[in-house]
Amino acid sequence: MRTTTTSIPCTLLPGDGIGPEITAATLSVIDALGVAFEWHEFTAGATAAARGDDPLPTAVLDDIRETRLALKGPLATPIGSGYRSVNVRLREAFKLYANVRPGRSLLPDGKFPDVDLVLVRENIGGFYVGVEHFIAIGDDPHAVAEATGILTRETCRNIALFAFEYALKHGRRKVTVVHKANILKSLTGLFLETVQDVGRAYADRVLLEDRIVDNCAMQLVLNPAQFDIILTTNMFGDILSDEIAGLIGGLGLAPSANIGKDAAIFEAVHGSAPDIAGQDKANPTALMLSAAMMIEHCGLLDAGGRMRAAILATVAEPSTRTGDLGGPLGTRAFAAAVIANL
Ligand code: NAD
């Protein structure tokens, strides 16, 4: 653990792959902004596992219990086997029931210039609870696979209340609940039913619509401007938020907040991007925007707004974009350009 003496205690997980690079870039902007954090830095995920340590060390959990706040780089998860996602375990451990993923057109010359929506994703239930197993038949140990999705009415109610209250607080007028209740009649049927129930109390202030997830995926590509808040289950939210990132220019631009009653963890939507790790190529915009959300969450609205404005001004200008957006800058030079725009 590294500690620097400043004022807002915050757990820091730079993460795997491009994580350390985009974290360093983000911290340099926060330093220049003059917001004082006391960073408690830890190694987790694949980097910790490679050293033979727990990918989610107890010290990390203890620290977040104290700080109730974390800025997190991406953590890699082995595919098909190996340890369970540390991202999912953190969300469960701190009951981070709401995942907020704003998707806004940041590139004036982008394909979809008028996207301005917020995806609110149920963050701890559904198919991501990890209740799954193989059944062996004969000599095939993987002959059958079974997975169970779990949602409670209370979970659905909490996320619905969060979405409607978020709408009121942020001046949003419409919630579109996205489900698959025609097929998954119980799992996503309960979600739909509960959201509609909660929505009745807000009917005079927030319009509620519903869409089946496949239709929503198509509508997003045809006319993303029709959406204001999309409220959906864990797995659909995971998938649709990457689609939304694609609409606004790519994963490098999509921030997120994991909000619970006892803690909040801020991270980019994207993963550890092993294909470009260690090359000063990663776009740190998503983590920087997540940090701006975190600064606002701490009540520093002016500072968070100033940081976001500097990031937006930097990505709006083609000559100060990173390579993923066709620009000439690397991670470090991009951070310097944001600092110049502060
Ligand atoms: P990914 O998001 O890491 O990468 C997908 C593609 O987008 C890659 O081509 C990558 O180079 C590019 N990309 C992503 N972020 C970028 C950025 N900031 N700048 C420029 N290009 C960027 O997805 P993946 O390859 O499917 O997953 C890699 C690992 O990340 C996996 O282990 C996965 O489990 C993990 N992951 C973690 C999180 C998280 O920590 N919350 C989220 C998603 C995936």
Image (spheres, rainbow, N blue to C red):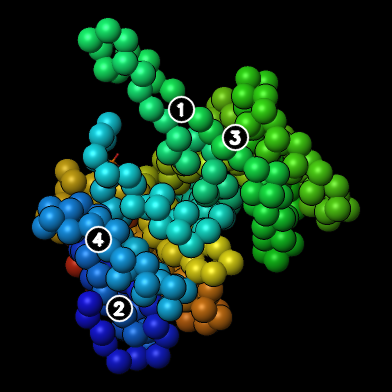
Q: Which residue is mark 2?
A: 40
Q: Which residue is mark 4?
A: 44
Q: What secondary structure is found at the residue carrying circle 2?
A: strand
> Relative to residue 274, is residue 159 drawn left or right?
right
| Residue 284, position as x, y percentages in the image | 30, 61
Disc nearer the start of the sequence (3/1): 1
Quadrant (top left, top right, bottom left, bottom right) of the N terminus:
bottom left
Q: Which residue is mark 3?
A: 223
Residue 12 in sight here? yes
Instruction: Please name which of the two marks, 4 or 1, marks the residue nearer to the observer.
Output: 1
Instruction: Please name which of the two marks, 2 or 3, marks the residue nearer to the observer.
Output: 2
Distance from Cα at disc 4 to Cα at disc 1: 27 Å
Disc nearer the start of the sequence (4/1): 4
| Residue 189, position as x, y percentages in the image | 69, 30
Q: Which residue is mark 1?
A: 147
Distance from Cα at disc 3 to Cα at disc 1: 34 Å
| Residue 204, position as x, y percentages in the image | 88, 53
Q: Quadrant of residue 30?
A: bottom left
Q: Pointers 2 and 4 in contact (CB under 8 A)? A: no
> Relative to residue 2, is residue 259 drawn left or right?
right
In the depicted view, which residue is nearer to us: 116 or 140?
140
Crowding at dot 4, Cα within 10 Å, few <14 / some 14-19 / many 20+, comes out as many
